[in-house]
Amino acid sequence: MEYSKSKLALIQLERAIELFFEDKDYVCSITLAGASEDITRGMERRDGLSTAVGDLEDWLKANHPNSDLLNGFYKKANETRNMLKHFSVCGESHVFVGIDEAKFWLIRALINYDRSHAVLTKPMFELISWIKQENA
């Protein structure tokens, strides 16, 4: 079966949301949200749009220009996803994965999907509603 990249990003993001809520499977939720985010980030770059992680870096530079977080920003921003996908001989043998990391990746993927497609689905609205309730 052949899939467009847009369809793949949608499938991955919706499944990531489902795994987050129904199974509390933060590992797979992050991995799938990260894959969706990567596809839509590429679409945004192609179309000259800003990305969620790019906006986060810009905000950090404007509001905290001396922050240590700016050193190796993208490596830090992608650290958990990359640790879930790769093994480094010199690296860690364990990875901490919690709800906050999963929320971070779902939000990044959701923002990028919205910007690149301008269409949100029922699972995406459910995630937004839940995030609003959690932060109320």
Image: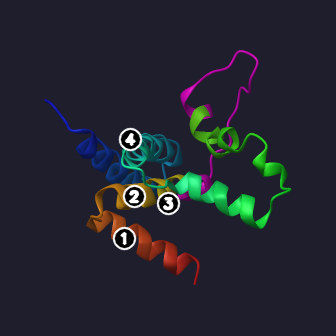
Indicate whether 89 appears above or below 104: above
- Viewer-nearest residue: 49 or 108: 49
Residue 22's tag is 2
Residue at left 52%, top 52%? 105
Q: Are marks 1 and 4 in contact (CB under 8 Å)?
A: no
Q: Which residue is mark 3?
A: 107
Q: Is residue 28 toward the left or the right of residue 18 in the image? A: right
Quadrant of the drawing holding the N terminus? top left
Mark 3 is surrounded, within 10 Å at the Cα level, by few (under 14), some (14 to 19) or many (20 or more) other residues, namely some
How far from the left and from the top, in percent, is residue 3?
Answer: 19, 36
Magenta highlight on residue 81: no
Residue at left 42%, top 59%? 110
Q: Earlier in the sequence, mark 1 or mark 4?
A: 4
Q: Are marks 2 and 4 in contact (CB under 8 Å)?
A: no
Name the residue type under label 1. Glu
Q: Earlier in the sequence, mark 1 or mark 2?
A: 2
Q: Which residue is mark 1?
A: 126
Q: CA distance from mark 1 to mark 2?
A: 12 Å
Q: CA distance from mark 2 to mark 4?
A: 24 Å
Q: CA distance from mark 3 to mark 2?
A: 17 Å
Of tags 2 and 4, which is closer to the observer? Answer: 4
Under tag 3, what secondary structure? helix
Quadrant location of residue 88? top right
Q: Earlier in the sequence, mark 2 or mark 4?
A: 2
Q: Residue furthest top?
A: 89
Q: Which residue is mark 4?
A: 39
Indicate whether 11 appears above or below 82: below
Q: Magenta segment range?
A: 83-104
